[in-house]
Amino acid sequence: MPVYEQIVRELRQAFPQPVSDRVHDAYFVFSFLRALDQVDAMKSAMPLLGKPETLDYEAARACRIADDPQPLEQVTARLVEHLSGLFIAGHPRTQMNVVPAPTIASIIGGLLPSIYNPNLVSDESARRIAVAEVEVAAIAAALVGYDPQQSAGVFTFGGTGTTLYGVKIGLEKCCPGAMRSGIPASARVVCSERAHYACRTVTGWLGLGFDHLVEVPSDENNEVRICLLETMCRDLLKQGQHIAAIVATMGTTDAFGVDDVQAIVEIRDRLVDEFQLDYRPHVHADAVIGWAWSVFNDYDFAGNPLGFRKRTVRALAGVQRRMRHLGLADSVGIDFHKTGFAPYVSSLVLMRQGADFQKIARSPETMPYLFHDGDYHPGQFTLETTRSGGGPLAALANLSLFGKNGLRALLGHLVSMAENLREHLEGHFATHVLNGGNLGPVTLFRVYPDGVDTFTFPQKERTDPACRDALQRHNAYNRRIFELIQQEALQGRGVVISMTDCYRETDYGEPIVALKSYIMSPFSEEQHVEYVLESIWRARAQIAAEA
Ligand SMILES: *Cc1c(COP(=O)(O)O)cnc(C)c1O
C-alpha cells in the first residue's frame, strides 16, 4: 500500500463515520469525554481553570506544523492546555462582564451543526437548520413585540453585525441605491454617547466615516438625552444631511442604561412630517443585552407568581417599562450569547418588516453557484456567505430549555443579587454606587478612602472642575483597590470583578474610573455578594496600612 493510502486510512478514524458505526461513535464521544476530564482536572475553588499564567507569544510565534499526523488524544490534550487560565464565567466568584455561562443544551446546539456543516446561506444546504433560524426569529419577534408574519431575522457575526445590518438598511432607505453607487457625504448616524463603540465600527466600515457619527449626550442614568437628540436630528436635517439611522441603546454595556425608544420613534415621526422627508430614518434598537427583559412583557408584576422580592419586582418592571416598546424600532439586535446564556457567537438581527432585507439583496446572477433550489436564500442579502448553524441552534436550545419562566427566573435572580450588592454599597460610608438608579445586573461603584464624605463628594467631583486633583487621586485609588481585589480573587478568595477606565466623563471632561460588578452566574448567591464587600474592606485596609 502506498504511504499516502496508509495515512488516509488512519485519518479516517479521526472523522465521524458517515455510516452508522456505534463502536466508532463511542470512540468519538469518549474522546470528547477525555477532554472534559482533563478540563475538569483544572477546576479548583478559584474562578478560573488551571492557574493564572503569563502568556508566551514568543513561543507561539515559533510554532510550525509537524511533518506527520498526531493521534487525536494528543491533539485534544494540546487543545485542553489552551484553556488553562481562562475565567469561568459561570463561577459564582466571577462578576466580571456580560459573559454568560452557556447551558448544556446550547453547547449541544452549537456542536451538532459543527458535525455536519449545514450552511445557512440557503436551505439547499441547511435544510431544517434553516427552519430553526426561522423558528428562532419568529420566537424572538413575538417576544419583542413584532408581528412574526411580517418580521424576519438572520444570525450574524456578533452584536456589531446586528447594528451593521440596521445601519446598512437605513442607509439604503435614506439614500436609495447607495449599495450600488456608494455613499453620499450627507449620510449621518445618530446614537447616544453611551452607545457601544460598535456604532463607530459600523460607520467606519460602511464608509460613512467616524466623523459622521453624531453622538448625543446622555443623562446621569446613561440614557440618551431625548430633547437633545431631537435638536441634533433637526439640525442635521436643516443642514440638508440624511439620517441613515438612529441607534437606540437598550442596555448599555457598562451601566445598563436603557434609551427611551418610544420617544425616539415619536421624534423620528415628527421630523418626517416637519421636513416632509421622502424617507423614514431607520430606528435600530441595539438591544443585544436588553432584549431578554422582553420575557417580562406579559409578566403579572402585581400578582408576582414567581415570588420575586419587592425590590427585584420593581427593578424588573422598571426595565420592562422601556423594553416593552422595542417593537416600535425598525430593527433589533439580539445577542443570545449575552443575556441568553448561549456560547459564542449567537447574534440575531430582526427586521420589523422582513421585506427590508431585500433593500440590500444582490441579484441572483452574481451568485451563479447558489440558490438553484429551495425557498429560503438569506445568502442573497447576508454579508457573510457561509453562516454556521451553531448560533440559531444554540439559541433555539435555550429558548426551549428556559421558556419564559426560566429566563424570567434567571434574570430575576441575577438582578436580585445585584440589588443586594447595591443595597450594601449604598449603605456604606466608603462606597458610592454610580449607576444608582439602575435596575439591571451590573453595578458600577467607587470606593473612597477614610475622610471622604460620600454623601456629597461624588457629586461634587463629577461636576466641579476644582475637584480635578481629587478626582484623579480617587481614580488611582480605585485602580489600586481593583488590583488588590483581583490578586485575592486569583488566590480563590473574594470575587473577580472588573474595572472600567471611563464609566463616563465628568462635566469638565475627566474620565471617571469605576469598579464594576456584573453578576451573570446562575450560581451566585448572597454570600458571594458579601465576598465582594469583604474584599473591598480588606483592600481599603491594606492601602491605609501602606500609606
Ligand atoms: C456587547 C455589545 C455590542 C457588541 O456585541 P458583540 O456581540 O460583542 O459583538 C454591541 N452593543 C452593545 C450594547 C453591547 O453590549
Image (tube, rainbow, N blue to C red):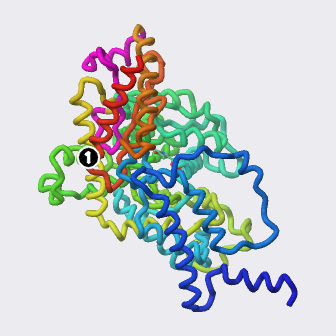
Q: Relative to residue 337, is residue 292 drawn left or right?
A: left
Instruction: Name the spot of residue 144 as percent of width and height, x first.
Output: 36, 56
- Decide if residue 446 is in sight here: yes
Look at mark 1 in the image and give the residue it sits on.
527
Front residue of 539 and 210: 539
- Decide if residue 250 is in sight here: no
User: How many residues crowd around disc 1 within 10 Å: few (fewer than 14), some, or many (20 or more)?
Assistant: few
Q: Quadrant of the N terminus?
A: bottom right
Tell me what residue is drawn at x 61 percent, y 77 percent. Answer: 125
Instruction: Name the spot of residue 501 as percent of width and height, x first.
Output: 48, 30
Q: Secondary structure at mark 1?
A: helix
Front residue of 11 and 293: 11
Front residue of 158 and 25: 25
Q: Amino acid at mark 1?
A: Gln
Tell me what residue is drawn at x 46 percent, y 17 percent. Answer: 472
Instruction: Name the spot of residue 51 as percent of width and height, x first.
Output: 51, 50
**Magenta segment: does it hold 439?**
yes
| Rendering quarter of residue 532 | top left
Tell me what residue is drawn at x 39 percent, y 61 percent. Answer: 141
382 w.r.t. 249: above or below: below
402 w.r.t. 412: above or below: below
Front residue of 230 and 477: 477
188 w.r.t. 394: above or below: above
Instruction: Name the spot of residue 88 as percent of width and height, x first.
Output: 45, 53
Q: Relative to residue 297, is residue 370 drawn left or right?
A: right
Question: What segment is highlighted magenta in the picture?
Answer: 436-465
**Of all residues shown, which one is farthest toward the right?**
2
Q: Relative to residue 212, is residue 457 drawn left or right?
A: left
397 w.r.t. 276: above or below: below
Tell me what residue is drawn at x 50 percent, y 27 percent. Answer: 235
Q: Quadrant of the C terminus?
A: top left
